């Protein structure tokens, strides 16, 4: 019995560590869901066909589509961007990921419920934007809602933490590039 307990402890520790990687928030994605991966790759990952809201919209020229999926027992929203191979052939790639699950955390432990100061200290050295949320076409500033975006440089993959009363309630992952160059 004494030999069985350490083995069970090791198995439990390995299982918990593997689960944590499934919910790891990083600038390039959430767990195995990565920005830039194709819809086919994501469908293979979750072992399910992803119904898009506008899959065959070539008339309006819509470049984007979205879906709500279930990944490792959490709800995740995903936006796709159309990538053309030829004029008649295209595929969809992940361009935005969002979730609200308390299981999701960054490597430094930032997740749902983390406070504003913890984010600032955890991402010291990263490029950061801290902004209030505005309503009514930018005329009314929220007293309780704000966002903090973090990325490694001025441009690149970004984690946006949405806060209410200085606590994280959800997060989004997406690229930020300056198209004016």
Image (cartoon, rainbow, N blue to C red):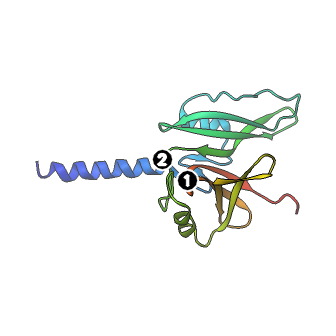
User: What is the x, y in percent for residue 156?
Assistant: 71, 60
Q: Secondary structure at mark 1?
A: strand
User: What is the x, y in percent for residue 99?
Assistant: 57, 44
User: What is the x, y in percent for residue 74?
Assistant: 50, 38
Q: Earlier in the sequence, mark 2 or mark 1?
A: 2
Q: Which residue is mark 1?
A: 168
Q: Decide if residue 117 is in sight here.
A: yes
Q: Which residue is mark 2?
A: 102
Q: Look at 66% across and 33% down and name the residue there.
A: 67
Q: Look at 88% across and 35% down and name the residue there.
A: 87
Q: Look at 69% across and 57% down and name the residue there.
A: 132
Q: Look at 64% across and 59% down and name the residue there.
A: 148
Looking at this view, name the residue that lies furthest to the bottom. 125
120 or 51, which is in the foreground? Answer: 120
Looking at this view, name the residue that lies furthest to the left. 1
Say left or right for 108 vs 53: left
């Amino acid at each position: 019995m004494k030999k069985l307990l350490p083995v069970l402890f090791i198995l439990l520790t390995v299982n918990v560590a593997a689960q944590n990687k499934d919910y790891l928030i990083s600038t390039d994605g959430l767990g195995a869901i990565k920005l830039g991966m194709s819809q086919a790759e994501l469908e293979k990952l979750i072992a399910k066909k992803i119904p898009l809201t506008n899959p065959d919209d070539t008339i309006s020229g819509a470049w984007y589509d979205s879906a709500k999926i279930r990944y490792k027992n959490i709800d995740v929203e995903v936006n796709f961007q159309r990538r053309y191979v030829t004029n008649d052939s295209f595929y969809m790639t992940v361009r935005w990921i969002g979730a609200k699950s308390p299981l999701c955390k960054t490597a430094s432990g930032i997740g749902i419920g983390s406070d504003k100061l913890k984010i600032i200290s955890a991402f010291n050295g990263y490029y950061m934007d801290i902004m209030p949320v505005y309503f009514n076409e930018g005329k009314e500033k929220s007293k309780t809602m704000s966002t903090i975006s973090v990325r490694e440089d001025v441009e690149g993959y970004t984690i946006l933490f949405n806060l209410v009363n200085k606590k994280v309630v959800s997060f989004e992952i997406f690229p930020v590039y300056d198209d004016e160059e």
